[in-house]
Image: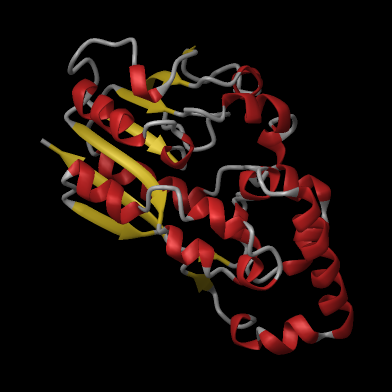
């Protein structure tokens, strides 16, 4: 998980913006079935950590500091080298973390080694690249996205049994990058942007330039005219996929 230092820098207040959305929580935990012991890899602040979690793995000190007092114990380690015995858990969970790993294939191999059931939430990078904010305002974000593993590649690597789309409701509580697909003004809020690694890792000059264009388009009504088709949609497919693999 190569972005530990990034999250030590940008993660202050992360738990305030990246809140658990109960609709996603239900979908993420359902494939765990009757697994009694769950390992949460790349756990962050524990936003989607089921009660059955026995251990969390997180390399960032800042993210670990924000975990709730009642959360599972956490070990500072990386996915590519889990300090755990083979088959030591019933299930391994990895939520929106694989794209941050330095060697994602090695990390997935580690998930397979420590648990017979793997539940991974990832996203199709092509859909993120085509997201209106990226396409129209900060296209530089797409350069990094194209270098990341897509949900399809992750599913292939894990020999996944199922791949399920997780749609974004228009009032999604978790401030993941595309969460504001119908609330564009939110991107003008610095607190919102701090919770989006896609923006935090982008060239700040490019981000500022894009935000100036977005603000102008919101004032003129151009954004709403261009994206009128989104305004009545209850859900949006931003490419998030729940990948389930088991032996």
Does the image show residue 52?
no
The foreground one among 197 and 27 is 197
Residue 99 picture quarter: top left
142 vs 68: above or below: below
Q: At x 66% / y 43%, what residue is drawn?
A: 201
13 vs 235: above or below: above
Tell me how the rendering is colored. secondary structure
Q: At x 27% / y 24%, what residue is drawn?
A: 110
Give how far across and how far down residue 8 sits, in percent: 67, 24
Give how far across and how far down residue 18 sits, in percent: 63, 42
The foreground one among 209 and 76 is 209
Q: Going by the image, does 106 lie left or right of 112? A: right
Q: At x 67% / y 73%, what residue is drawn?
A: 136
Give how far across and how far down residue 106 sits, in percent: 29, 29
Give how far across and how far down residue 235 sits, in percent: 51, 71
Residue 70 picture quarter: top right
198 vs 100: above or below: below
The foreground one among 111 and 24 is 111
Does the image show residue 191?
yes
């Amino acid at each position: 998980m190569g972005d530990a230092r990034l999250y030590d820098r940008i993660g202050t207040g992360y738990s305030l913006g990246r809140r658990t959305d109960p609709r996603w929580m239900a979908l993420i935990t359902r494939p765990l079935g009757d697994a009694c012991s769950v390992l949460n890899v790349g756990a962050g602040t524990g936003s989607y950590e089921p009660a059955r979690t026995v251990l969390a793995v997180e390399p960032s000190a800042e993210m670990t500091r924000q975990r709730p007092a009642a959360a599972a114990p956490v070990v500072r380690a990386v996915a590519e080298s889990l300090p755990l015995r083979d088959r030591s858990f019933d299930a391994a969970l990895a939520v929106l973390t694989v794209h941050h790993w330095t060697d994602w294939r090695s990390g997935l191999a580690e998930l397979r080694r420590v648990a017979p059931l793997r539940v991974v939430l990832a996203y199709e990078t092509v859909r993120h690249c085509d997201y209106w904010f990226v396409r129209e305002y900060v296209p530089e974000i797409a350069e990094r996205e194209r270098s990341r593993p897509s949900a399809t590649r992750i599913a292939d690597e894990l020999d996944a049994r199922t791949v399920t789309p997780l749609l974004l409701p228009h009032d999604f509580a978790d401030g993941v990058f595309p969460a504001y697909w119908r609330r564009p003004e939110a991107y003008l809020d610095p607190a919102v942007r701090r919770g989006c690694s896609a923006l935090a890792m982008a060239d700040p000059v490019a981000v500022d330039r894009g935000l100036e264009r977005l603000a102008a388009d919101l004032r003129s009504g151009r954004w709403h005219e261009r994206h009128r088709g989104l305004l009545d949609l209850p859900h949006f497919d931003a490419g998030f996929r729940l990948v389930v693999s088991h032996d």
